Every structure is written in structure tokens, then in C-alpha cells.
Image (cartoon, grey):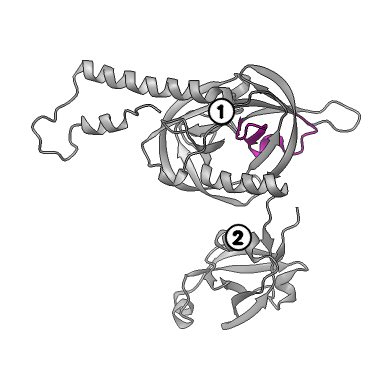
Amino acid sequence: MFESPETRLVANAPGNGSTDPAVRPASPAEEGGLLDAYSSVVTRVAELVSPSVVNVDVRHAPKGREGPRGSGSGFVITPDGLILTNSHVVHGASRIDVTLEEGGPFRADLVGEDPHSDLAVIRIDAPALQPVALGDSGSIRPGQIAVAIGNPLGFQTTVTAGVVSALGRSFRSRSGRLIDDVIQTDAALNPGNSGGPLLDSRGLVIGVNTATIPSAQGICFAIAVNTARHVASLLIRDGRMKRSYIGVAGQNLRLRPRLVRHFALAANGGVLVASLEEGPAKRGGIEAGDVIVMLGGEPTPSIDAMHKLLTDAVIGAPCAVTVIRRSRKLDFTIVPAELPS
């Protein structure tokens, strides 16, 4: 463990609301000391975690010919060779190779992946692996130090640093499903950083680096480690993440205020059923044109809100659905099924 400079930065900052006459701007010497402390934090995080960060090299080989290659990052989470990375790094790979900071490549096997959260777990057989320590993304705050380690553009074990810019962002994965509780950071990320760790000043993983906005500068995203921990545990146990579905293709619809007041609805939006496939909703009596406003006793103001309610916990369990159909409020019971892989 080592001391982070955040506390000293706050204590010595002018304009922090203190009336203590001793509070004054830092002198050049003191500023130099703070910068040295910041550098020391980043250096120690890099020294501590870099041995656990890996380069993930993938090949996509169609039958009979050499296919395209790609690469990303990952990090060791158990001493027996389990590695966490992004689903989009390894999805569809015919071969996965992993290179450590000092050793490799090692052939890797896919344990499981979840494209909806853009997370995957792979495994290698290698000696003396050093796993990372996972932190608690629920305890981090905007402004605190964030360190990213990865392999951007093939440059192995690259360290960048910045701050946690914002919390609670939502980001749409390549599957189209919304990933909630995403961390925004200005620690520089580039292609190849995907799957690497985002770390706090103690070297604890707080996120899994996953995406940037190419047209912007300093806007990067990481999947919160609390989400990653939950998904990874299920991938290790089952090889996949179970989710439920009801067989509805919908779109967000804003409800008229008069309708919301008349039916005493909890939200001013719902999910318009554009079409149905053979599935739980159709069997339960839902029709195209219905507006779903409640699922399992909870409001559904948007498709994303409905997806949040369709967890593995409701698979096979009767679930109440409330819809508005041609100015009538109707209640149905459906039994959500497991979302096909």
C-alpha cells in the first residue's frame, strides 16, 4: 500500500472554503513535491500490476485459408490462469494466444463470453501467474486518479494516467444492449487497450477498459469492476451469461400526459410493441401495437429499462405485464424464457 496525493491536494488547495489563514497557494517547491507524489503513485501502480496484464492475440481463420488477426489486452484474475478481457477482442476467434510481460505466447482457451456486457474469460496454462486485486467500483469518485495499462497498437504494457471523469454512464455494446454503470475516464485509450485494467491509486482494478469515442479526445469508457466481477463469476461457472426474453421487438414511446394521469402510471413512457415472434409475450396475449408500461410490478419507460428487468432471475417464473391497448389498461401474465445464445 502507498499514499495517494489526493488528500494532500485537497488540503493545500486555495478556495476550499477554509477560513484558516495558514491556507495559501502551494509554493513551486511544494508543487514539485505534489507532482513527485503523483508520479510515484502511477509508477508504483504500474510496477505492481504490469506483470498481471497480458497481450491477447487472436486469429480468425476461415476454412482452408489464413484469416484476419486482431489483438487486445486482458489481465490475470486467478493464479490458475483465468484472464478477463473484452468479448469483442476474442469473439469468433479460431485461435487465441496470450503473451505476458515476461513470457509467452501461451495458447488460450475460451471459458465463456457475454457480448451483451462485452466481457469474456479465457484460460492459459502458465507458471507463476500473478493475479490482480479487484476493487469496488461503488466506492470510487469523480476526480480520483485512474491508471490504464494495456497494449495499444501492439505496444506492450503501455501505461497512461488521468482521472475518473464521471460515473454511472451507459454505453451500448456491439450487441446493441445497453451496458449500465460504465466509468468514464480521460486516461488515454487506443485500439489494443480493450480488455485491460483501469486502476485506482492503490493498484486495485476498478474497471475493464472497453471503448473510446474516436472523434473526441479524453472520453474513454471502462466497464465497472462490480459488473465485471458478477459476469465473470457466471462465465466461469456456466460458460455463458443467462438472460431472459419475451419475444418482443419494441420502440420507446412517450405517453400523453392525460393518459399517464388517467391510469396513474409511474412513468411517462412505455415500450411500443412493434412486432412479436413466437415466444412468451405472444403466448401470453400481448399484441402488436400494445404499449408495455409495467413488467413484474416495475415501470418500463424504455426498452433499456425493460431489459434491466429481464434478468436470469425471471426465467421460467410467471411475470405480470401491464399494457395500454387502444386507451384500455390490460393486465397479462407471461413466463419469460432464456435468451438463446
Position above or below: 8 against 184:
above
Q: Which residue is mark 2?
A: 307
Rendered residue at 63%/38% (across/down): 86
Residue 242 image point, x, y percent? 69, 55
Rendered residue at 62%/34% (across/down): 78
Residue 114 in sight:
no
Q: Earlier in the sequence, mark 1 or mark 2?
A: 1
Membership of 241 in magenta stretch: no
Mark 2: amino acid:
His
Q: Nearer the viewer, residue 216 or 39?
A: 39
Q: Nearer the viewer, residue 159 or 184?
A: 159
User: In which image quadrant can residue 229 be found?
Assistant: top right
User: In which image quadrant can residue 88 be found?
Assistant: top right
Q: Secondary structure at mark 1?
A: loop
Q: Nearer the viewer, residue 258 or 21?
A: 21
Magenta residues, start to end = 75-96
Residue 39 image point, x, y percent? 38, 20
Q: Residue 213 bears which disc, if any?
A: none
Residue 207 image point, x, y percent? 51, 38
Q: Which residue is mark 1?
A: 190
Spatial CA distance of label 1 from label 2 is 30 Å
Position above or below: 142 against 130:
below
Q: Is residue 9 left or right of residue 211?
A: left
Q: Quadrant of the N terminus?
A: top left
Mark 1: amino acid:
Asn
Q: Secondary structure at mark 2?
A: helix
User: In which image quadrant can residue 52 be found?
Assistant: top right
Q: Is residue 267 left or right of residue 30?
A: right
Q: Is residue 205 left or right of residue 90?
A: left
